[in-house]
Image: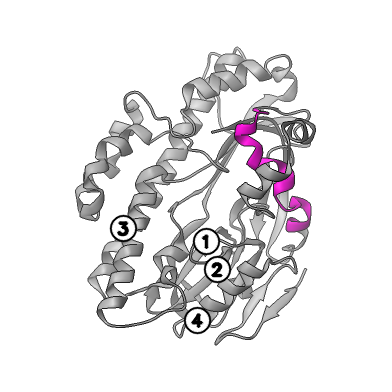
């Protein structure tokens, strides 16, 4: 599916892979497009919706600046998927028990491990902790206790099946509180830097850091650290979930992972596009260079997709990070009931109480339409349907 909409009112064009764009999101996109340092154009994924500073599902590049809020407050947030050697028949009669096992092993929401896991303490990222911005140094203990925890909101752990009845483990999480605190610190640094030099931007969350500044060098160092933390966070949770799957399926021996995919969707990286070295920011978007493996999840109760990138240059070789919200959490809670949640998550072993009502499937865009709208960005390799969903 080609680009469906192009906004031309800004300094740079905004290319959008959907015609389903809310007014607030369009306004944010045009504000970003008004900045003089944008490279070529802005690419907008089909799961686009309004966010802090810039829209979720936004990809833009620059030769000489980074906007911390455009990277997002959950630095390194992303997905991981593991195909196990088990078949669906092994799960019969065990869904509820397996779900509760995972919930006991992996803290969700605001919870954390009572003491850091052994794998957390062995992570070599702690050796660099004191080189992070001094504003987060007091958070070492909390960061260690939260490594290997899910968080809340749209983060999840799922047990899924593919069309061949293979059992998969799928999870979505990021850099937890330490990532948010790092983001907040550097967003404030960017705001103060522009105030110092009397530079104005359309919105305070578009405050930027010039690449050559010490402030930007510190930010990029911290972003890389947070991305590594987020990756390790997913790895630890995968190991804990694998242990629970083995135990509940009465498989005492270690098993060979058939396939594994892991990808970020809130980050910045130096890449080559249109013959130039540029800093690419993906907020709510995955890299989809030709041959890249990626994961595009739907909402609880729908489907998720393992994809392969097609390397479309117009999207800066990117694709969507999920279905994308079509209504706010507040509106979802006001619109739907627990009965609606029960109906929309039939066949899925999951929480069905008002605490997760804002995650109801109809609060999200139709994942099949989102996938169809980017068939020039990725090809679907595997379709997954969840049978268990764990949320904070």
Is label 1 in contact with label 2 (beta carbons under 8 Å)? yes
Residue that label 2 marks: 59
User: Which quadrant is home to the N terminus?
Assistant: bottom right
* Label pair 1/4, CB-CB below 8 angstroms: no
Give above or below for 85 relative to 37: above
- Residue 387 located left or right of residue 244: right
- How is the model colour-coded? one colour
- The 10 Å Cα crowd at callout 1, few under 14, some 14 to 19, many 20 or more, is many
The answer to which of marks 1 and 2 sits earlier in the sequence is 2
Q: Would you say residue 220 is visible in this rendering?
A: no
Alpha-carbon distance for marks 1 and 4?
Answer: 16 Å
- Residue 328 or residue 20, whichever sits in front: 328
Q: CA distance from mark 4 to mark 2?
A: 11 Å
Residue located beneath label 4 in the image: 39
Residue that label 3 marks: 185
**Is tag 4's residue or tag 2's residue first in the polypeptide sequence?**
4
Principal SS element in the magenta part?
Answer: helix
Q: Position of residue 315 (x, y in %)?
A: 61, 71
Q: Secondary structure at mark 1?
A: strand
Kindly identify which residue carries mark 1.
283
Q: Could you tell whether 79 is left or right of 63 in the image?
A: right
Tell whether position 174 is magenta.
Answer: no
**Mark 2: which secondary structure?**
strand
For the point 45% across and 37% down, the residue is 235
User: Alpha-carbon neighbours of circle 4 within 10 Å: few (<14), some, or many (≥20)?
Assistant: many
Asked whether the viewer can see residue 71, the reply is yes
- x and y percent of residue 281 in the render? 48, 67
In the rendered structure, which segment of residues is drawn in magenta? 351-371
């Amino acid at each position: 599916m080609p680009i469906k909409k192009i906004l031309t009112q800004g300094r740079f064009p905004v290319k959008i892979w959907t015609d389903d764009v809310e007014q607030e999101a369009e306004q944010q996109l045009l504000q970003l497009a008004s900045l003089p340092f944008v490279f070529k154009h802005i690419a907008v994924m089909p799961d686009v919706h309004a966010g802090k500073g810039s829209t979720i599902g936004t990809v833009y590049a620059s030769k000489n600046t980074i906007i911390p809020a455009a990277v997002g407050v959950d630095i390194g947030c992303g997905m991981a998927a593991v195909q196990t050697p088990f078949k669906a028949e092994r799960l019969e009669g065990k869904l509820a028990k397996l779900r509760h096992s995972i919930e006991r092993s992996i803290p969700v929401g605001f919870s954390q491990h009572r003491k850091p896991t052994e794998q957390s303490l062995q992570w070599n990222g702690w050796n660099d902790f004191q080189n992070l911005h001094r504003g987060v140094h007091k958070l070492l203990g909390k960061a260690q206790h939260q490594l290997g925890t899910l968080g809340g909101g749209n983060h999840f752990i799922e047990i899924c099946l593919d069309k061949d009845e293979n059992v998969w483990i799928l999870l979505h999480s990021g850099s937890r509180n330490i990532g948010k605190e790092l983001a907040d610190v550097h967003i404030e640094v960017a705001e103060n830097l522009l105030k110092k030099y009397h530079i104005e931007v359309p919105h305070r969350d578009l405050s930027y850091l010039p690449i050559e500044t010490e402030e930007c060098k510190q930010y990029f160092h911290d972003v890389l650290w947070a991305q590594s933390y987020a990756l390790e966070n997913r790895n630890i949770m995968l190991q804990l979930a694998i242990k629970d799957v083995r135990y509940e399926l009465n498989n005492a021996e270690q098993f060979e992972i058939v396939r594994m995919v892991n990808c970020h969707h809130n980050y910045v990286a130096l890449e080559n596009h249109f013959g130039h070295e540029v800093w690419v920011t993906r907020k709510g978007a995955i890299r989809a260079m030709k041959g890249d493996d990626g994961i595009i999840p739907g909402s609880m109760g729908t489907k998720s997709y393992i994809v392969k990138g097609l390397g479309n240059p117009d999207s800066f070789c990117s694709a969507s990070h999920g279905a994308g919200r079509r209504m706010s959490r507040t509106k979802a809670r006001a619109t739907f009931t627990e009965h609606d949640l029960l109906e929309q998550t039939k066949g899925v072993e999951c929480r069905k109480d008002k605490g997760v009502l804002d995650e109801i499937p109809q609060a999200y865009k139709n994942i099949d339409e989102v996938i169809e709208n980017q068939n020039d960005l990725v090809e679907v390799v595997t379709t997954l349907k969840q049978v268990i969903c764990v949320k904070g």
